[in-house]
Image: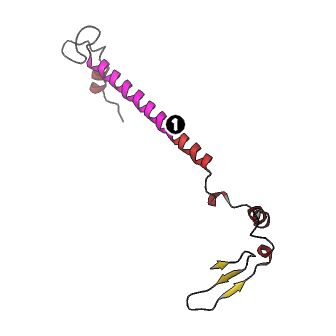
Amino acid sequence: FAMDPDGTLHVTPPGGRTRTTRPDRIAEVDMSTPSHLQSLTDLLGPTPKRYRSPTPAERAARRATAAERARLAADIEAELDAAARIRAEQNAGPARDGTATGGPGADDASDDRAAVDEDPPPF
């Protein structure tokens, strides 16, 4: 494939003859002027967004958004780890009456796990 500045398209298939095509609408555009992109846009319409390359500003915004999401995820993970550690420390500590939770001598009313184990739900 080759295209001349005036819009003439030259197509040579392997082992075939060269075909020359000169589209009417593109031939009107002067490809040598700096405003040829605007002329093509006027004639053919804008490029669909899915085919556009992101601008440097859009790339920077995407990187900043990704970094913010990663930072937020790390903060949430740290808070969950701290809460799990605090919960584990609270469960491992002695009960209010000085006996271990669920151990010998513990009050059955203060131990919810014993009540759940003794009477499982009917379903």
In the image, 5 versus 26, the foreground residue is 5
Q: Which residues are magenta?
A: 67-93
Amino acid type indicated by mark 1? Glu
Residue underneath mark 1? 68
Q: Name the residue at 35% across, 26% down.
A: 84
Q: Name the residue at 31% across, 18% down.
A: 90
Q: Is residue 82 magenta?
A: yes
Q: Is residue 79 magenta?
A: yes
In the image, 39 versus 115, the foreground residue is 39
Q: Is residue 56 above or below residue 99?
A: below
Q: Which secondary structure type mostly characterizes the magenta part of the structure?
A: helix
Residue 50 location (% of width, % of height): 63, 58
Residue 20 location (% of width, % of height): 70, 85
Q: Name the residue at 65% across, 89% down.
A: 18
User: Where is the N terminus found, in terms of image quarters?
Assistant: bottom right
Residue 4 location (% of width, % of height): 70, 77
